[in-house]
Image (cartoon, rainbow, N blue to C red):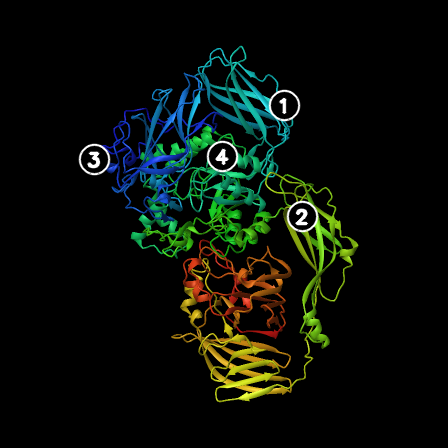
Amino acid sequence: MGELAPTQMTSIGSNQLESLPDYNNEKIFQRNRLPARAYDLPKDSLLLSGKWNFHYAPTPMHAPPVSGKPDIDGSWTDINVPGHWQLQGFGHPHYTNTVYPFPVRPPHIPTENPTGTYHRTFTMPETWAEHSQLRLRFDGVDSAFHLLVNGQEVGYHQGSRNTSEFDVSGLVKRGFENDLVVRVYQWCDGSYIEDQDQWWLSGIFRDVYLIALPQSRMEDFAIVTKLDSEYRDATLEVALLLQNVEGLKVSFGLRDHHGNGVELQDPILRPETKGRVTKSLAVSDPKKWTAETPNLYSLTIQLRTQQGETLQSIETRIGFRSIEIRDGILTVNGKRILLQGVNRHDHHPEHGRAVPLEYIKKDLLLMKANNINALRCSHYPPDPRMLDLCDELGFWVMDEADLECHGFYDCVAKPQDIPESMNYEERKKLTFPEAAKYTSDNPSWQGQYVDRMEAMVQRDKNHPSVIIWSLGNEAFYGQNHKAMYDYAKAVDPTRPVHYEGDAHAVSADMYSYMYPSVERLKRLADTEGVTDGKFEKPIVLCEYGHAMGNGPGNLEGYQQAFRDVPRLQGGFIWEWANHGLWKKDDKSRGFYAYGGDFGDEPNDDTFVMDGLCHSDHTPTPGLVELKKVAEPVHAWVEESNLVVQNRYGFRSLDHLTAVYKVKVFTDRYAQDLMSGRSHANATNSSKILASGTIDLPQIEAGQTSYISLPAEVSNANADSEIWLTVSFRMREASAWAKAGHEIAWSQHQLQASDYGEPRSSHDQRLNIEESATVWTITSGDSRVTIDRTTGMLQSWQSKGVELLAAKGPRKGALHPSFWRAPTDNDRPSDDPYWKRFGVDAMTSQLRSLSIVRSSDDEVEIVSKLYLAPPILDWGMEASITYTIKSDESISIGAKLTPRGKAPANLPRIGLDLYLSKALTQSGYFGLGPGESYPDKRGAQKVDIHSSPVRDLHTSYDVPQENGNRMDARWVKLNGDGGPGLHATRLDQDKLFSWAASMYSAESLDATRHPCDLREENMLLLRLDGATGGVGSGACGPGVLERDQVKCEESSFAFRLRRV
């Protein structure tokens, strides 16, 4: 479907405006292109990638003539293929999320249509048979191109991420050098339906091949595996499209992954005519393919003469598996599957969508190592070699057609002034039907829509990893989607079809949603398509957990819903990696660029930076969190048993070993204080009480087992906190991980600890010096200054070193604070809300100040402040009590009471402290080693951690709030040999959050790139009684009510000690 008959081309270089050029005509999307076929390259194919000659022109009319041999003069240069010309010095990258970067009037495109003319020569290998059919194959060209060989026009193609092949047999000169010219257009009418959320980049960005096929040949092949009702024995069906095969035969051979032959009955086919023929082969109890157990077999199909000469051989890997929707549940091999997936775009920080195969493999290995089992190819078919890797490594793949036209939404919404704050479902009602009329519900575009579906289905139909077809993304819904669906089901009835734009699953086999809250998702599961409590279609989330910057939050909430509600079968995090492109500024400082950094207008700014990986594809804390949430083994302690739950769908835990460790955490510092001993050389340490392995019994998929803990674990005892950590690790290496790789872990507190209130061992008298503006309290080497004009602690010195110092006039060295830098998830809603209330601009008024000597070695100062922003009439009454002791400790107790028209919630409630920059090392007992927030903390372990202060900072590609650490018992900051600072919480909740950074909240808020951040001249420390979650409000639900910091009366107390 969707093919045009071969015609004489007249559009190259044409200036006849009355006749639309091919790239400006929605009905012309190919000329002379061969039918799409399954991906298979002969082993002797000639790779034509490498250095090509290149000419860049502002419009097609400015491009050089190509009717004869190109004149490669000084206007030409060299360019790398695969590659994008914008990343090789021609034009510039342009990022938009949804809007079109040009005026909208399909099929018309800008007159300014940059055109790249590519040229190279090639010679046909002498070993190829004289009468071979020669094909030129392009795996990806953005956005459209005309092809010429030896000055003769060959064909035309558009569909940037789809493969195209052309028969050039009659044009190639055997034994001579041949000229190949590809004229590529930046824009074509197809650009209207390639409006995916990514950079607009042009050129030949995937490989180019010259291939030879015999005159008598297998033109195409399709493989279907069918399992019996017990999912044991299989039928292997191979459909062949044959050409010129009279008097020939086809043989079939099957080998397992060890290379051992599999017996096949009657493995010979003797076709009588050309065309489509099918061979069914019975296979007894093959090992089944799943994402957990990617068992592959090698199938060899050979076309032979009656004398046994092999004319053509196809070797492909197959997996025996069966996909069904049974009772409304998506199943593979009869079992429900759970998609723990990510959306993956083609991206490389230097090459754009021209991604090397090794880089693709590196990504997939990282996904597997982080318990990701599914991929959505957003929003186009990937490099075909990636699916070979998915077959091998084990992924559930949703393969998606190269189709998105989200920009039509803005064409409809902006003239109506529809606010983005309006409920999304309401906005859809007002805009989607009208937006669909441009292309999706326009019959003039049906051929092009179906062509994109055909290209994907035919190329990728034989991959066992591909279990779902998708009609595209955010293209509304219209008759052309129905035509795509009908094509897919007619050609391949074995796979279900997905399309989120078909909101009520009229012609989709599942319901699909983007970014619903967990509660809404559960309601949809109970109501959408449900009649009398029954449903026929499952639910997947094609996008959720928007991973922009410091996030996403509440992944565990979604995962729990997937576990609890069988109909909810998981989904795909948006998205795998940031799309930043490496760029250097005029000072040679490098950074990962986003929208606007190349002078690209209009643009969608940072919205391209929303991945679980940084732009260099190293993990963000969000990926670390996802690994924990998705781990396939869950364990906990009940009495003297370790309870182990196998959350795999298809395999036992035989491939894992359980390694345990029991640690006691000794706070000798607190113990010394309790006993009255000196703490000058006190340390905080941990000790292993027991360790070993636990023999796991046979625990099949979905089962739970109770295992007796070793006596040394059950009987562990000490006067401090004791924690059991169990790590589930791979016994042997696999295709994607080494032996010993940790799949899952669990942690359990075996014994708590409460040291009580420490008493001072020092009876040295504190001295109070008074002036009109300050009180100075001294004892030995310690000197504390209180500013009587502000009521704030101004300075704390020990041994001549300033531990705490005022940030500036009337700032204080320590003060209550409610502000932190916004995250990307805060910016749409929470950040403007908080700034509207002036939370970022609080000032302090002193209402009263008193000083009392409680004893010779203790002084108490009570400072009553009113903290409030300018302009507004709300504020926080703050009663701050400083208890200064001669043991070089300061306790700070705070009681906070909001007054006036206060905000409902705050980013945090705690203290800001300004420390000496000489404190370069940190140690802490709490969750770590990475950052944690109330809704993003599951991946962090309780332990005593240490780190250089600089390494506490998470360097997101876009600077923002980062580095918070939760459930701290204590934190210690010190330098090289000088005095340091030790902090604990004193009030009822002994646990607290903290962060230390060289960067101010103001700097993190205002700075666009990490290279622009400037360090403060002091170390900034936060000690918090309460801190808010991160949510995924950049595109999805904000922070849950339970994880917000309410603006209400609160209190907390901390103790600071010199160490």
- Callout 3: few (<14), some (14-19), or many (20+) C-alpha neighbours within 10 Å? few
Dot placed on the residue nearer the N-terminal end, 3 or 1: 3
Dot placed on the residue nearer the N-terminal end, 2 or 4: 4
User: Which label number is shown at residue 17?
Assistant: 3
> Label 4, on which residue?
385
Say left or right for 700 vs 280.
Answer: right
Amino acid on which disc 4 is placed: Arg
> Label 2, on which residue?
728
Q: Secondary structure at mark 1?
A: loop
Whole-percent x, y for residue 256 in the image: 62, 28
Is 211 rendered above or below residue 829? Answer: above
Residue 547 seen by the camera: yes
Q: Residue at x 46, y 30 (%)?
A: 459
Q: Quadrant of residue 737?
A: top right
Front residue of 300/455: it is: 300
Is 877 rendered above or below residue 41? Answer: below
CA–CA distance in space, label 4 to label 3: 41 Å
Q: Nearer the viewer, mark 2 or mark 4?
A: 4
Amino acid on which disc 3 is placed: Leu
Q: Quadrant of residue 736?
A: top right
Q: How many marks?
A: 4
CA–CA distance in space, label 4 to label 1: 26 Å
Dot placed on the residue nearer the N-terminal end, 4 or 1: 1
CA–CA distance in space, label 3 to label 1: 63 Å
Q: Residue at x 45, y 19 (%)?
A: 127
CA–CA distance in space, label 2 to label 4: 32 Å
Whole-percent x, y for residue 904 in the image: 47, 68
Q: Secondary structure at mark 2?
A: strand
User: Which label number is shown at residue 37?
Assistant: none
CA–CA distance in space, label 2 to label 3: 68 Å
